[in-house]
Image: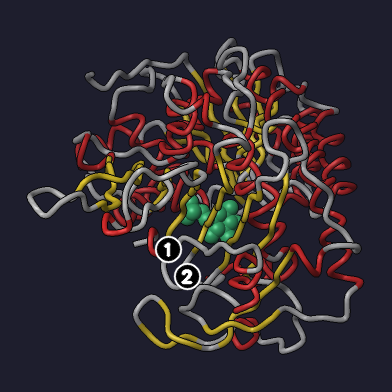
Amino acid sequence: MAVRVIEVAEFDLVVFGASGDLAHRKLLPALYHRDADGQMPDDARIIASARRDYSDDDYRDYARKALKEHVSDLDDAHLEKFLKRIRYVKIDIGTGEGFEDLKTVLEEREDVIRAFYLAVGPDLFGTICENLGKISVVNTHSRVVMEKPIGKDGASAKALNATVGAVFNEDQIFRIDHYLGKETVQNLMALRFANALFEPLWNAAHIDHVQITVAESLGTGGRAGYYDTAGALRDMVQNHILQLLCLVAMEPPESMNADSVRDEKLKVLKALAPIGEHNTDKLTVRGQYRAGASAGGAVPGYLEELGNDQSGTETFVALKAEIANWRWAGVPFYLRTGKRLAQRVSEIVVQFRPIPHSIFDEEAGAITANRLIIRLQPDEGVQMKVMIKDPGPGGMRLRQVPLDMSFAEAFKVRNPDAYERLIMDVIRGNQTLFMRRDEVDAAWAWIDPIQAAWAASKETPKGYTAGTWGPSASIALVERDGRTWAEDELV
Ligand code: BG6
């Protein structure tokens, strides 16, 4: 089927933090691509805002540089057309200076969608929203986009949501989890709910366990300051990994309507069996990388990178989660994520149970249980491991082979970045791929006791050499149950 581009309505998108890393690496390239694909109406505007003393043209130069660096198929003619959409307003969020200038620019046109993208630290969300309220630019056509982290625990998330909620209604608030915009994550819904094949088997009777791995080969990069206050549990598990778990485990929603999907995800979060002081030792592993070799060269350890040898922040976490409901009782969900691991790979592995009885004799070889692998990155695709007969004469010899579908090979189209889809969903007002307030609360309600138990324990994160799969305790976590991490799949 041909790629379909649906033009969105006229909009003004205000980006706070327009000179920051997210705007540079993700937002500008995503907007450029949507424009180049013909999705933006003629008069759509991007209003960049930051503290720097830029003119419109200065910021356009900045954006031009960012796009040259981050867009591989840049078309020079289109680039100049795109840059014309950009305006710049200098705002000092701390003092409130510049908000009136923003009002003047916004009021040049009425009745268009106004989206405010908060690409800044969460400590500024409240002040920005209050100021937007004060200058009366929030109307029924407005929306606000919040980047994570939404709080550092349940209490701070509630406070943050309340401040933003005082200015915007819940149906105007878009909490981004960029994992939900990844093609394969959406494919998970297509796989489960557009095929009759999987759903009857999608339960404890047929599935032995599920593994979710989000491994990164890079370290904390230039974000060590933020990362040290967060750690892997808050940075990756509370949001991305729990969202993936929800999509794997949720009941079929009534429709793709935002609340139907989010209602089902919420039920999964609420059914997660609590992990706290009584069982963190058994069910969680924390790690911190030491010097080693990663991404093709020698790298320092986390503490050296941070310049603080006292930090107890985890750069790796492995957990054994359980969903206490009829569908999943007794099926472990092994979750792990970390920085400076052996490679950058994100996968969901659904391990089916073995066949109940074999009709083949020993010479046919061992029968390995089916496995469904949903690969998010780097090469998006789905793989189903099945048993077949080895071709040719020589009797019945069984072998496991992958039924492999790499999306890059199957569809010769550019794979859009998650932000492209998500920003356009904001303009369209479609909240299906965004987190609702109660989902954020429920996720924190599961995470907080783990964090508290770690804080109370005298143990520090276990060291692991950069470039490996994390501390050996993570292997033990799974092997204790007679299982292994599916590392052979991760290549
Ligand atoms: C972000 C985390 O949300 O996701 C980062 O804060 C992490 O620490 C990043 O590196 C991973 O995203 P992706 O899309 O590269 O897998």
Q: Is residue 271 left or right of residue 374?
A: right
The residue to which callout 2 is attached is 218
- Given this view, does label 1 or label 2 mark the residue nearer the observer? 1
Mark 1 CB near ligand 1 (8 Å cut): yes
Q: Where 397 falls versus 204 (above or below)?
A: below
The picture quadrant for ligand 1 comes to bottom right
Residue 232, can we see it?
Answer: yes
Furthest residue toward left: 393
- Quadrant location of the N terminus? top left
- Look at 44% across and 16% down and name the residue there: 8
Could you tell me if residue 92 is visible in this image? no
Instruction: Identify residue type, mark 2.
Output: Leu
Q: Position of residue 338 (x, y in %)?
A: 57, 66
Q: Is mark 2 within 8 Å of ligand 1?
A: yes
Going 80% across and 43% down the picture, which residue do you hit?
A: 127
Q: Which residue is mark 1?
A: 344
Residue projecting furthest to the top? 111
CB atoms at circles 1 and 2 under 8 Å apart?
yes
Q: What distance separates the C-alpha of mark 1 from that of mark 2?
A: 8 Å
Counting labels gives 2
Which quadrant of the figure has residue 250? top right
**Label 1 secondary element:** loop
* Residue 285, placed above or below residue 54: below
Q: Earlier in the sequence, mark 1 or mark 2?
A: 2
Q: x and y percent of residue 426 in the render?
A: 56, 26
**Crowding at mark 2 (Cα within 10 Å: few <14, some 14-19, many 20+):** some
* Residue drawn at 25 percent across, 44 percent down: 388
- Asked which quadrant contains residue 126, the reply is top right
Density class for disc 1 (Cα within 10 Å; few <14, some 14-19, many ≥20) is: some
